[in-house]
Amino acid sequence: MNLGIVIIGENDPAIAARAKQYRIALQVSKKYELTHEKTLFVSPGVLVPWDLLPAACHFLDRWDAACPLWKYGVTADQIGEADERALTTEILPDLRVLLYAHELLFVRKNEAGQALLETWRRECERGADERLAFLRAYYQVKPRLCVLPISWLGNVRGASIQHMHARRPGIERKKSRLVRVSIGKGRYVKCAPEDVEKVKAQYNQGV
């Protein structure tokens, strides 16, 4: 896959163990550095959707970055302090937009990917909320961002438990609850059955 993983801040033994199992290069760093052609930046404690990593790598063949939406129904005007929301409106006047889960961020090693990371870190120095800072960076750099369904985060725990069960003798492997959804000609994402219509709506609206 030519993918490397960077755990931000401090090591996560669970992520490190699975990365070793999947033979994916991993390092722990406080810096957002593109160590490979395609790099996954992940925060400690995040349950990585290991079975979806090949799909993420495929997206980065075309897109500069990819990450899931954070929460349905929570928009930028509902988080952070008033002064930082005001700072954000200097770049994005209307804050009634969904936010991104930068805790699981795939970035391609190219000019736009590098610019996104560098601008994001600069914006973090201007305000305390990393999520609003990421939003400001995104709207300044305007990279080709592949927005992934929330299920890339929400259903990870079930996928991880399923994987562990499959490795235990005498325990029948359960079928994955994820379904494949077409988002364009020859393009697909996986999500939970209950999120299918939301995913279709997001991509039809050009999210």
Image (spheres, rainbow, N blue to C red):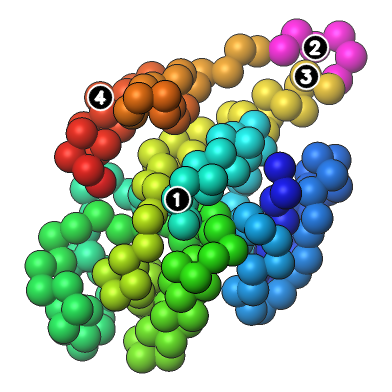
Instruction: Tell me how far mark 4 sits from mark 1, CA to CA.
Output: 23 Å
Q: Position of residue 16 (x, y in %)?
A: 80, 54
Which residue type does callout 3 highlight? Ala
Which residue type does callout 2 highlight? Ile
Which residue type does callout 1 highlight? Trp
Q: What range is drawn magenta here?
A: 168-173
Task: Write down the residue under mark 4.
Answer: 197
Q: Position of residue 112 (x, y in %)?
A: 45, 68
Residue 10's mark? none
Mark 2 / mark 1, whichever is N-terminal? 1
In reply to whether residue 87 is colored magenta, the answer given is no
What is the secondary structure assignment of the residue under circle 3? helix
Q: Classify residue 18 as left or right of residue 52.
A: right
Instruction: Tell me how far mark 2 sits from mark 1, CA to CA.
Output: 39 Å
Task: Write down the residue under mark 3.
Answer: 166
Q: Classify residue 1 as left or right of residue 93.
A: right
Instruction: Tell me how far mark 3 sits from mark 4, CA to CA.
Output: 30 Å
